[in-house]
Image: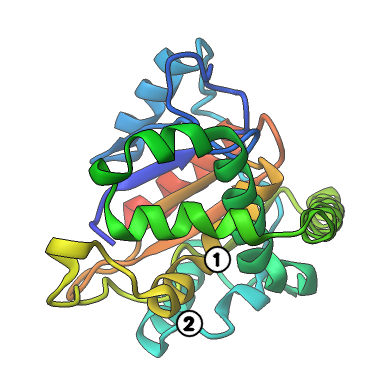
Amino acid sequence: LNGLVGLKPTFGAVPGEGTARLTRDLDHAGPIGWTVEDVSLLFEVLGATRVDRAAAIGRVAILADFFIGAEDGVKNAVARAIRESFGDLPEVATPKSRWASAVQFVLVTTDAHALFFDEMQRHRSELGSDTYAILRFGAAMPPDDRRKAENMRKAMRAELGALLERYDLLVAPAVGTFALPLHASSLKYGELDAYGIGRMSAVTFPANLTGLPSCAVPCVRDGLPTALQIIGRAGDESRVLAAARVVEAKF
């Protein structure tokens, strides 16, 4: 939404010590920077690793389901960026990923409630209304909902894993909308536009839920910024960043 490059590394690639976790196994630490090289350098330091800048991009496919429900302007910008950067690509289906928002909501709220209930009670007056409302939702979730969400998460992981056996990278929009206008009351109460935020961020959840590396790279020359998302195999940040450099060179 802001014209910056962001890398969400493979879950665990950057040590989690010292970070304030909201969940048991969804929080990823990663770099944000002006350029792909900025992000690469930061990741090398944070992850104590080396990015192979000569990595081959390999076979790329489009996650067609990630375009469903997105704003026309976002869909058009990302489709154009994919075409200009990688040419005509095959499209693949990811029907399980359509459940990502629901799965993310159940896992985050139940984890947050289980991990931070005492803190929430002690510091209620210091929490924004939006944050408190989201964290409290987990209190009403029955254990069976959590089990169903975990099962769907496993299915999503298997689905994307199977695609990444056929292709080296998967590309899609990084967000479903352009930046949303803030409601007039948001400064006082926080932003409670659940529909808008859900529509905007639904396509960011699959890589988060599966722990796969994903890079968001800007892909608009004029007007409001949006980004193309590049997802790779676990541990294959070098290839993901190599593809991001190709997009960056065009835009």
Q: In which quadrant is the C terminus drawn?
A: bottom left
Picture coordinates of residue 10, whole percent (x, y): 62, 33
Outermost residue, front direction?
122
Which of the two residues, 215 or 210, is positioned nearer the viewer here?
210
- Residue at 45% from the left image edge and 62% from the top image edge: 228
Outermost residue, bottom direction?
72
Q: Quadrant of residue 41?
A: top left
State the separation of the CA atoms marked 2 and 1: 9 Å
Q: Quadrant of residue 13?
A: top right
Judged from the image, the secondary structure of the residue bearing numbered disc 1 is helix
Q: Is residue 29 left or right of residue 159?
A: left
Outermost residue, top direction?
48
Residue 208 lies, with reference to residue 202, above or below; the image says above
Q: Is residue 1 left or right of residue 188?
A: right
Picture coordinates of residue 34, whole percent (x, y): 23, 41
- Residue at 71% from the left image edge and 40% from the top image edge: 233
Question: Is residue 199 among the parts visible in the rendering?
Answer: yes
Check disc 2: other Cα within 10 Å, few if <14, some if 14-19, many if 20+.
some
Residue 52 lies, with reference to residue 148, above or below; the image says above
Three-letter amino acid code at disc 1?
A: Val
Q: How many marks?
A: 2
Q: In which quadrant is the N terminus drawn?
A: bottom left
What colour-coding does the image apply?
A: rainbow
Q: Are marks 2 and 1 in contact (CB under 8 Å)?
A: yes
Sequence order check: which comes first, mark 2 or mark 1? 2
Question: Is residue 84 among the parts visible in the rendering?
Answer: no
Residue at numbered disc 1: 203
Picture coordinates of residue 26, whole percent (x, y): 60, 40
Residue at numbered disc 2: 70
Which of the two residues, 165 or 94, is positioned nearer the viewer here?
94
